[in-house]
Image (cartoon, rainbow, N blue to C red):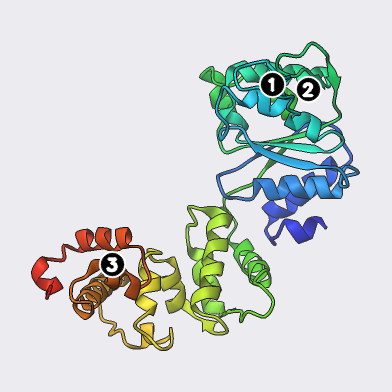
Amino acid sequence: MISELVIGDSEAISSVRTMIRFSINARASVMITGPSGCGKEVVAQAIHRASPRNEQPFIAVNSGAIAADLIESELFGHESGSFTGATGRHVGLFEQANGGTLFLDEIGEMPLSLQVKLLRVIEERSIRRVGGTKQIPVDVRIIAATNRDLQQEIANGGFREDLFYRLCVIPIKIPSLAARPEDVGPLVAHFISLIEPGEERPVLSEAAIERLAAYKWPGNVRELRNVVERAGIFFPGQTIGREEVELLLAETSVVPMFLHTADRPEAMVANVEFAKGFSLQDHLQAEERRLLVDALVECGGVIAQAARLVDVQRTTFVEKMRRHNISRDERQVA
């Protein structure tokens, strides 16, 4: 089960799977660290599913996505009339996750005032709703995650040291995808397997995998999944080589419009004259500009019609016109 969720052949991912196995039967809190998009929630889900709590709720919350004045109520609940707008009792996430796992993502963004209350909940294993007087016992396994350097946050006064040590009983660190290129191939195979049954799946050549493995992946595993999904849309049932990978990694807004000009996607490469100093980005930008102008001419300069012709929003089309400095003369308005 762990290997089905945490994909990869690298030593780093093997170590992550080992740490998961150590943690599944423990009650202690887990702290998962790593850059954004590296798969921290996937690791949290793997811990939960392999643990004795797997039949109980797994609830994930982004600590930085909830307004500061609402996060206490969201986590601990509130009683009717406890504040303006509290027209009824609200059961918080801790109570909803009772018996299961609560995943606190982006824990480094939690306000200091709430960090104190979270520490108390961890130590006392009970919560008190906002506006309530009764302590409510909760049995919740806490898994926290962050892409921040919490030691630096502690030094800067942005995170409580005592809370850090209560959360970081079992530390799990996930490196960036760029630091483990040998995981790209297994991840690509996994994401291709997730394409809906009945849809044609692309086949990535060895050269394509090598190019993907050499890429820096600023968006980490999340970005790789997007690229594979894009490959399934633009190259269904086709073999993808290095050239197609370059197109998939290029500016995403260029690729869909570029495909409208070819009966078959491989024509994108076949019709390009390669020469010394060739720039893929410059070529795609020039091709996009030509398509914009051709669409405008075809539609008599009517932007809304031209936008529909190339299947983009009118506002997107106007922004591309501005970016490419397309003049009124080039539009040839009738």
Cα distance, mark 1 to mark 3? 55 Å
First in sequence: mark 2 vs mark 1 = 2
State the residue position of label 1.
163
Can residue 4 be seen here? The reply is yes
The reply to whether dot 2 and dot 1 touch (C-beta < 8 Å) is yes
Which residue does the image show at 39% across and 78% down from the upper left? 259
Q: Secondary structure at mark 2?
A: helix
Q: Secondary structure at mark 3?
A: helix
Q: Residue 108 in the image: x percent, y percent?
A: 58, 29
Q: Amino acid at mark 3?
A: Ala
Name the quadrant of the N terminus.
Answer: bottom right
Q: Amino acid at mark 2?
A: Ile
Q: Is residue 42 above or below residue 197?
A: above
Q: Which numbered marker is on residue 304?
A: 3
Q: Which numbered marker is on residue 147?
A: none
Cα distance, mark 2 to mark 3? 57 Å
Q: Residue 152 in the image: x percent, y percent?
A: 54, 25
Cα distance, mark 2 to mark 1? 9 Å
Residue 198 located left or right of residue 68: right
Q: Amino acid at mark 1?
A: Leu
State the residue position of label 2.
122
Q: Residue 330 in the image: x percent, y percent?
A: 12, 72
Circle 3 residues within 10 Å: few <14, some 14–19, many ≥20: some
Which residue does the image show at 75% across and 19% down from the upper left? 129
Circle 2 residues within 10 Å: few <14, some 14–19, many ≥20: many
First in sequence: mark 2 vs mark 3 = 2
